Image: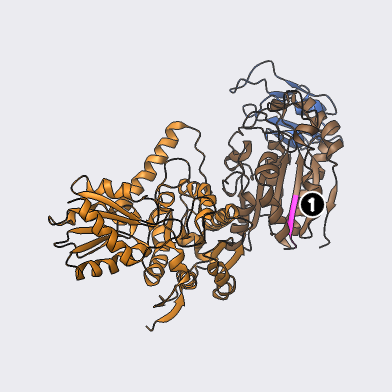
Chain colours: A orange, B blue, C brown
Amino acid sequence: MSKVLMKGNEAFAEAAIRAGCKCYFGYPITPQNEIPEYMSHELPKAGGAFLQAESELAAVNMAYGAAASGGRVFISTSSPGLALMQEGLGFICSAEVPLVALNVSRGGPGVGGIQPGQADYIQVTRGGYNGDAKIPVFAPAGIQECVDLIYECFDIAEEYRNPVLILADGMMGQMMEPVELPPHKGITPVDKISQEKPWAITGTDSHEGRNVIYSLRMQPEVLEKHVEKLFEKYARAEKELTRWNSLSLKDAEVVFVAFGTMSRLCAEAIELLGERGIKAGMIRPISLWPFPDKAFDELDKSTRLVISAELNMGQMLYDVKNAVQGRVEVGLINRTGGVVPSSLEIVERTLKLLEETK
Amino acid sequence: MKKRFKLEFNRDKCKGCEICVSFCPKKLLALDKEVNSKGYHPACITDQDACIGCQSCALMCPDCCISIYELEEGE
Amino acid sequence: MKTVFAPTSGMTPVDTSYCPGCSHGIAHRIIMECLEERGALGRAIGVVPIGCAINAHHFMNVDMCESTHGRAPAIAAGIRRVHPDKLVFTYQGDGDLASIGAAEIVHAAHRGEKFTTFFINNAIYGMTGGQMAPTTLIGQRATTAVDGRTVEQAGMPLRVCEMLATIDMAVFVERVMLTNPAQVRRAKAAVHKALDIQEARKGFTFVEFLSACPTNWGYAPVDALKWVEEKMAAYYPVKNFRTVEL
């Protein structure tokens, strides 16, 4: 298959369409606006439905309704918009409904700015919703990887009957890269939904018995049993969905831990450090939850410093320290509020940290 | 020939709200002195033969407790 | 013998969780009777609110889902996009619809969403224990307005039908009350009409039921119905605000 040059946001939307997305709901927010724009004219051509919601609160609930009644649903937003969607996402976890959500994140807190940021790490990995729930989160490092993940995540969401989040950032949404688009899967016809999803609320004519999608469990023992059942799924997710890439860990003196845009800069920094005679490597988490703790078992004896490199004040740092378990020193290289460091800045700060930890 | 009706209460569903009692145009309904399994005094009919089958009670019942049948000759 | 009146198969045999004399039971029954009479129970999908009626899915014998607080119209809009040929409805109380869900109901109406909203207005928050709602009458006591609602402190009660009737795509808007057999028959006719218009895909359809909450008002059930007729209907006129010819 040939590659096409596409802007990230448009490629992400096209990936969802090709995965058989029936419905898209969204509310304008920068830097992801090309997604609803693209969906508004392309999704109906593919037989799907586009609806611009009155708010992110409405968008996530429209998504819940469409998904509860058996449609493949995709939503996208950016950081403050995701904060508004959190209640709905927690509810959807509890109601066990599949959904794919993309966060093209920006700097914060508050309205923050519209430049790429990674300050949603805690928001996406811990959730802003109430109660015990978890959402698998994947962080692609490029447009192709993001396209492939969106395409795959519909199946993951349906298998687990849980939302799946993809954390891209404004850089990936706005840049262009050549991308190979996956084949069209086609939208499940409405009269086939109840065969594929016997739990969906499609009207009792179309299935045995009566289907109810719900979250309320007034009996504490019943609620506890439900949460335990959810956590059996999450334990399975930890086994099946943990993903990472390792780069040049052998003989590395220093190892970066970075995801998304920051991992691309770290890859450049590793080359620049090599030119200066310093062996550096990288662990790139692809799944942020489940966090790839296991990746850190691959650390070489030569490694004396692990650096969490992030576009925030050090949110992933907690997970990195937890994974390193005190085996080596852990440092932080970060910029925030949408400021993206150059690879050269990363090199200089790495050299300083190496000096300090001698 | 005068139509005859039979009124049936789902005794254990009734919450004794008395709405049916207040809407019977013939004043045929009352709350039972005995309580039902929920602990409410359920509604009952005091004079079955006098029921005119108007359905006022059934229309106002919030708990779907009431069924009304028209009796055939000889029943 | 011949059946004159029997409980609808649209209601499950489960006992409702509502207090004695609560109008939810009457509203549930007539909506489900209408669906049964139309042969639509098997192609209906309903959305329940947060509030007392979150339990409605135990009692209404159709496919249903629960909602986050106030967002039932957004959820129904989503269901509609997947199932354009089904009969979709939301069932919402006044805290859910007129307060936290005010944006969602307005925009569902404004888009002309092809579903029907059944709005239970009993002028109070029921499930949480009698707090003031946007619909609480002036002078009416609530646990957050112990001396009665005042205009200075909480403004005037929100008239939802009147507001929605200003929206072009809200093609059927009617307020009914469940206070006597004649009014219940009239309410049922309004439900059928709303469903007729939904099935003709003319636009958004809305039926408001003035309802009694004897427990939180502190009235006996029969007195509560009188209060609806005397006090609520005086401020919330029972009438059709908008309809469309089919």
Q: Quadrant of residue C179?
A: top right
**Residue A15: x and y, percent?**
45, 71
Residue closest to the far bottom = A2
Which range of residues does the magenta coloring cover? C201-206
Q: Residue at x 53, y 66 (%)?
A: A22
Please identify the quarter of the rendering in which residue A152 is found.
Answer: bottom left
The image quadrant where one finds the N terminus of chain A is bottom left
**In this picture, residue A82 sits left or right of residue C119:** left
Query: In this view of the protein, which residue sits in the foreground, C221 or B25?
Result: C221
**Frontmost residue, B49 versus B55:** B55
Question: Which residue is located at x 81 percent, y 48 percent?
Answer: C162
Chain letter of mark 1 equals C
Q: Tell which of C32 and A214 is nearer to you.
A: A214
Visible residue check, residue C27: yes
Res C189 visible: no
Secondary structure at badge 1 equals strand
Give, as a three-letter code, the residue at label 1.
Answer: Val
Queried whether the magenta region covers residue C232, the answer comes back as no
Q: Percent x, y for residue C202?
A: 75, 63
The tally of labels here is: 1
Circle 1 sits on which residue?
C173
Image position, residue A187 (x, y; %):
50, 69
Left or right: A221 as drawn, with respect to C173: left
- Image location (x, y in percent) of residue B51: 81, 30
Residue shown at the point (66%, 32%) measured from the top left? C126
Q: Is residue C79 above or below residue C20?
A: below
Q: Where C57 sits versus A301, above or below? A: above
How packed mark 1 is, by other alpha carbons closer than 10 Å (few <14, some 14-19, many 20 or more), is: many
